[in-house]
Image (cartoon, rainbow, N blue to C red):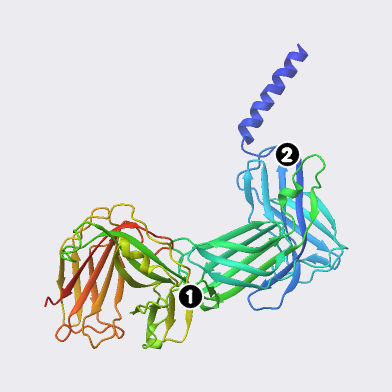
Amino acid sequence: MPQRLTYLFLSSLVLLLAACGGDHQDPRADHSLHSVFGPATLIDGDALSSQGVAGVLGVRSTQPFEEGAELSFAITGPDGPVGNAPRVTNPTERVSSDYLTTPLEVEGFTTYVPGEYLIEVYIDDELIDSITYDLSEVAAGLDAPDFTAEATLQGVTLTFDEEIPALLTRAYLRNVTDEGDLVLTGAAQGPTGTLELALTPDFPLNRSDDYILTILADSATLANSAEGEGSAPHIPARFLRYSQNLQGDDFDEKVELYYNTFTVSFPRDYDEATYDAGEPMYVGLAVLSLPLGAPDPTENPWAMFKLERPGYGLYTGMTWNEGDRYIVGNMGLNAAAGFEELVGDLSFSFDGTHYIYGPSPVSASASGEPLHHLPSLTVDAPTATSLYLEWEAVPGATHYTVLIYDLDPQVEPTPMVFLTEATQLTVPSTAQFPIDIDSSEYGIYMIASAGHPFLPGVTNMPGSIADWAFPAP
């Protein structure tokens, strides 16, 4: 009988504990700690580098943690407490129900000296354990980087003068002028000399905004101290915590020059005596890409963008708007037999003083089918100094490239170029391209394409072309 009463008592106690505290951690739970910790080189903005401490702490429990459980810590170094507060509370990450982590970062602490460091670990307000680090042989954090930041069409490339001897390096680029919270990120494992921060379509990367670049480097990570046979739970490490303010024009810029080709049909009335309408032909667009956007042309209104092919004698002048990431020139309209004449290096100049030579373009080949012909264009002049264009959608087309020329033979050909996914366009008068309907006639040249026409490597994309004059002669 006593044995049965004992069993009933224990069963009732288990049920009572479950009813009263089912969501609370068992007070008898055991905890295992692992961490990486050590000196960190700290750079914030233009301030001189200093030496603090950094690291990461992980705590695993034999029982699930309470929802909202919080890790905190206190660090004592050779010269006494580290930091201004008795305990430091950084954001706690709940990796799983039984595993919490937090950064061992102490804001404002910049007086690291080698020696012994004691880390006391708390869950909520309860001291659960402590860690002792002997850093007598670790003099300083990782060296501050010297680097260049280059903007490309794909993102931002960080190139370090010397490899960062880290197991994990991360970088974050945030636009502080824009109101959004978009950030470019990149990471590399092992010693690295470069980092790639992939560009997202909606991230504002330009030469006029302000940015903050953050670089974090760790010579060891929490994964190195994971529990397991032969692993050390607490690893001395060296760190870099770098933050720098940048302006858009602080970035180097990878300017690319190339041209893309489009398979089209001979437009109606092009040369009926020689060609059949619908016979395949090619149009080339020379493209200068500027990842940070084009400069303001009003700074030097005579510095036209010119494309040239050595030995061929053809150039095209082009006006652009500030911030345009692409400046485009029409490089010819040829049948397959004559298209080889367009193959060759291209160059560009601003005001005839600065040249960069681009790669040899890819030769076109007779493949693919063109899109349908562009329907008739409706052109109107809402005012004497503006044009309004409207056209029907071309089946299969996603983009329309529109070039507007002044047909006055006394005016150097400097067309304005517009890229749109819509089927209408308003063209206002600008200082670089003044419009006066009463005194000039304008040529309008359009290419419909089955994709973005300016991206590198676009060859033989299906397209269609058409041209008009306004007012009609």
Q: Quadrant of residue 435?
A: bottom left
In the rendered image, residue 231, in percent from the top left (x then y), is placed at 80, 44
Tag 2 or tag 1, which sits nearer the N-term?
2
SS at circle 1: strand
Q: Name the front one of labels 1 and 2.
A: 1
- Picture layout, residue 109 above or below residue 441: above
Q: State whether residue 204 is above or below residue 279.
A: below
The disc labelled 1 sits on which kind of residue? Tyr
Q: Is residue 288 visible?
A: yes
Please name whichever residue, 428 or 184, is drawn nearer the observer in this view of the structure. 428
Q: Which residue is mark 2?
A: 27
Say left or right for 169 vs 207: right
Residue 267's image quarter?
A: bottom left
Q: How far apart are labels 1 and 2 at the CA level?
A: 72 Å
Can you tell which quarter of the image residue 279 is in?
A: bottom left
Is 348 placed left or right of 400 in the picture? right
Q: Quadrant of the N terminus?
A: top right
